[in-house]
Image (cartoon, helix red, strand yellow):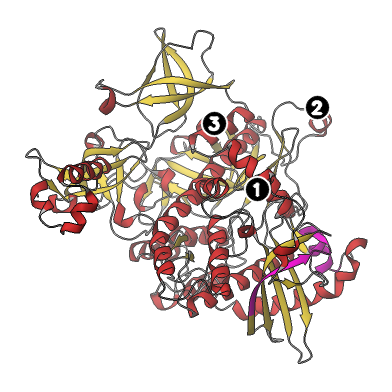
Amino acid sequence: MHVRDLERTFTRQALERLGGWRNITDLLEDLVESGKVIRTRKKTYGLPEAMSLVRGRFQASAAGFGFVVPDSNMGKGGGEDYYIPQDRTLEAWNGDTVLVRMDGRGDSRSDRDGGRDNGRGGRRGQKGDGNPRATVVRIVQRAYKQLVGTLEFSHGHPILKPDDFRARHRILLLPEGLEELEAGARVVTELFWPEHTGEDEVFGQVVRVLGAEDDPETETEAVIVKFGLRGEFPDDVQEQANAIPGEIPEEALVGRLDLREFNIFTVDGRDAKDFDDAIHIQPTPEGNFVVGVHIADVSHYVQEGTPLDGEAYARATSVYLPGRVLPMLPEHLSNGVCSLVPYQDRLTMTALVELSAEGDILDVKLSPSVINSKARLTYDEVQAYSEATATLPDHARHLEGDLHLLLKITTKCARSAARRLTRLQVREVKVDVDKDGRMELIPIREETARGMIEDLMLLANKVVAHYLIEREIPTLFRIHEEPTLQKFQDVTGAIGRLGFSFPGGEPTPQAYQAVLKQVRGTGRESVVNTLLLRSMQQAKYAGENLGHFGLAFDEYLHFTSPIRRYPDLVVHRTLKKVLSGDFKAGNREVAQFQGRLPSMGEHTSDRERTAAEAERDLTKYYQCKWAQEHRGESFMGNVSGVVSSGLYVALDNGVEGKLHISHLDDDYYIFIEDAQILKGRSNGKSFRLGDAVQVTISDVKPLARQIDLTLADPEDPDYTPGSYDLPAAAQETPMTDVKVRARRRRTASRSGRKNSRAFP
């Protein structure tokens, strides 16, 4: 349509609001700039889909080709992505928003190992694989404004070597400000793109020097920049937070349940500082129990439209990097005013749930409240009490009866939920870095203490969701859609090759649970659990309730962590407005709020994924540092991935490396893709998922997050069995670099956060 034709479709009132055709043109040009509208050579405008164009996000592979995830598929995991051959990417970089034109179908028999980083054997890990082929015709928006990398020199010219292995382009640097820098310096570079400069290729300007190469502190800063995380709080946000008084004024208590005399307490990791949930239990005369879940009332302090709220929304989540936390709220709130510390009055939102002796929900009451925690317990203390190996500490001995009841009732709840709750136990290791730079790799296990708190939080999340849905009130829900047909078919084949199957052949929570029971206690348990987890879609936030597949809940949201998750803060505000009578189904304010929810869900989900990626990236770096300390040593591990170029092997402490096929030199090995096997052509020896192998750490490149392995040979005179503990001499020597000592005793409680990677 020409702009004049479009103008005729508007009413007079609409034209007056827009200001005439010139303003319509400006609006159209804004839409053209965002890629939502196309301007033709004849200066008419049209929608991309009407011109066989698709707008989406480019995902690059290390091999040069890529995939485009259409906007309509973003966060859904459904539909097909477009395969972009290497010569048709238009120099798009990973994460760029692009327009593509469909060309045909991909080659389903091409090399399958190009995108290992995007999910071993997954759809985006394959080159073509029958996906529709497309050509990038326009780059709408660049994902990168800055890039972190290492300074190098070529023939005297400064060049940036990007950290991101998918940024395969040479990046020339302007020489200004580089006079004192040597090769190997870690730098942040501002990028100038050809479409803006008119040059033939991208170039950069160093704007910040992070420090020396391969230093943990430098690498932490690099990850913060690379993933666009927010470090220090702006001055106005910090000032607003600091101005909030620590004492609760009397007027803030009006209309709240006064629960200060109840035996309420917290259970968290030993290093936790922000306590956003507390619990209690009371028997009733009828033989039932009232369980109280009390959550910090952050919404009382963080008001909509303030600088504090704007910054919290921009962050959307606290980020837990090894050795450093980037909180969603300033410390005065997160560790102070809002934190449910013992012996201090705190404002909360409370869910009182009456349960039968068998764990069935009988009644629910939700209300703003005020509490005074009577104790701060750790997971270690609760676990020891549950195992009858120790009593509670003296300051909490008066809570032993309450804790006994809570452990008993949550055990009943867990048993009744066992038929529907999908719990995927994957090998998980937390990287803990102390103030001296010493690192520990700590296995995180599902224990009674953690399970008790998780079950109580699930209960609170579930009853709040039901309360709002019953009243037809929209909010941000936590949804988890069922696996796509393609992913379910893939995982069905993969577990079938391992000797297991889904009963009924349908992707239901019960079917997944049945497979978990089949593999429990077998040597394939970890591998099968990992395959099941990879087959599922990502949980996310959305403005409509679509249920939670993994939990088998029809109604679910996040209510229990508003100190560290913005969606929980949104739910608190929604619930408060319903309780006060301000929100009623169908009124104008609710309709306006509902219109904002889709973009809020997309933003908070995106920030959550980014935070998880940043944590994984830095964790992999620290794991590489551990591997550096143990280079030349041999360890037992299990095959965690099979690709055409070799094997991925996970050690017992969670560190994963690659054994390249060139190091399998006793035969010529063939990759049997359908069976996910490497098989020797002459000797018949094979490697498949879950197989136990003994490997030696041969080479490590921390900046590339790369650990190279070889098969260990106990007959080799250089064979050195590895130990997950540091030698005594190393423990006695002051260490300036990162060292690792993996504990053999149970230390899951060192985590300063609860369930950060739990399925919900």
Q: In x, y percent, where is residue 758? A: 59, 60
Q: In x, y percent, where is residue 9? A: 12, 57
The answer to which image quadrant residue 14 occupies is bottom left
**Separation of residues labelled 2 and 3 (CA atoms):** 26 Å
Instruction: Count neighbours of disc 1 (C-alpha within 10 A) and say few if under 14, some if 14 to 19, many if 20 or more.
Output: some
Extent of the magenta region: 365-388
Q: Is residue 370 magenta?
A: yes
Res 182 visible: yes
Q: Secondary structure at mark 3?
A: helix
Please give the residue where the numbered disc 1 appears in the rendered image: 430
Please give the residue where the numbered disc 2 appears in the rendered image: 734
Instruction: Count neighbours of disc 2 (C-alpha within 10 A) and say few if under 14, some if 14 to 19, many if 20 or more.
Output: few
The amino acid marked with disc number 2 is Pro
Q: Residue furthest bottom?
A: 286
Q: Is 684 placed left or right of 51 in the picture? A: right
**Separation of residues labelled 1 and 3 (CA atoms):** 20 Å
Badge 2 vs badge 3, beta-carbon distance below 8 Å: no
The amino acid marked with disc number 3 is Ala
Looking at the image, tell me whether mark 1 or mark 2 is earlier in sequence order: 1
Res 635 visible: no
The answer to which image quadrant residue 440 occupies is top right
**Separation of residues labelled 1 and 2 (CA atoms):** 23 Å
For image coordinates 69% across by 65% down, the residue present is 348
Disc number for residue 229: none
Q: Is residue 45 magenta?
A: no
Please give the residue where the numbered disc 3 appears in the rendered image: 222
Q: Secondary structure at mark 1?
A: strand
Looking at the image, tell me whether mark 1 or mark 3 is earlier in sequence order: 3
Q: Is 538 placed left or right of 15 in the picture? A: right
The amino acid marked with disc number 1 is Lys
Looking at the image, tell me whether mark 2 or mark 3 is earlier in sequence order: 3
Quarter that holds the C terminus = bottom right
